[in-house]
Amino acid sequence: MKNAVKNAVKRTALLAALTTAIATVAFAHGDVTPQPVNTDALPEVGEEWLTENPYRAEEAGEEVWLKAIEIGSSGYNQNCARCHGLGVVSGGLAPDLRYLEAEEYGDEWFVERFQHGMTQNGVTKMPAFGELLGQKAAWAIRTYVETRPDDGALDDHMTRLTEIRDHLLAGDVENPTAVQEELASIADDVETGSGAPVADSVAFEAARNMTDDPATWKHTADLLTVGLSAAE
């Protein structure tokens, strides 16, 4: 599998950080005020906290999964990005959550930390979000986090995606169905850092938004522009 060795190394490093080194990390979350996350559009999950993500597509269906990513993206950016990085790309101070395995072991660690936070020597390093934001917000953010593309996952496709973007902006797409299928094919080739089966990459979003209607091409091109810039 492409990037398998790199992913294994990164996940091993993350687990080491989660179990040992995290206690010595020099960053503070204590001054972060949790911001509410509107999860009304997501299915209820009950009062008892789960140990496995209920919003994955294979369990909840693709529509719920996509909605969880959308809500989780907003929730993450409001509450987590300051320390864990925009796009879940850590700057090195906090653990890179992209490499937390998309399975029950990773889910258990994530939701325990989300629910209870972390305190070291009487100092709050991470606030407890559970009571304030709730379980639905936790799993939405988890869904967003685990669908982040791996480092360099788009490198082999940057030139072609830029060409597609330029054609969309110019409005000279001769076969929009073929272009949409190509974007979907590129999206299928993009790996997540977590091992989740589908990456919510710029190619994935572009394929979802583009149709044979020229009215959608500008928006798709804009998505590509933003996504390609972030990937560089």
Image (cartoon, helix red, strand yellow):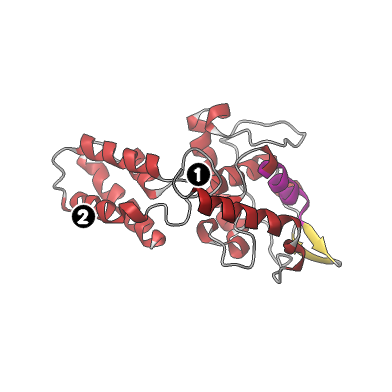
Which label was assigned to residue 70? 1
Which quadrant would the C terminus be assigned to in this image?
bottom left
Q: Which residue is mark 2?
A: 166
The reply to whether dot 1 and dot 2 touch (C-beta < 8 Å) is no
Q: Nearer the viewer, residue 152 or 27?
A: 152
Nearer to us in this view, 115 or 53: 53
Residue 30 in view, yes or no: yes
State yes or no: residue 115 in magenta. Answer: yes
Q: Amino acid at mark 1?
A: Glu
How packed mark 1 is, by other alpha carbons closer than 10 Å (few <14, some 14-19, many 20 or more), is: some
At a point 38% along the width and 49% down the height, the residue shown is: 202
Q: Is residue 102 above or below residue 121?
A: above
Residue 216 place in picture, x, y as percent: 27, 43
Secondary structure of the magenta portion, mostly? helix
Q: Residue at x 75, y 37 (%)?
A: 49
- Mark 2 falls on what kind of element? helix
Question: Looking at the image, which is closer to me, 6 or 108?
Answer: 6
**Which structural element holds mark 1?**
helix
Seen in the image, is 56 located left or right of residue 3?
right
Membership of 118 in magenta stretch = no
| Label whose residue precedes the other's in the sequence (1 or 2) | 1
Q: Which residues are magenta?
A: 106-117
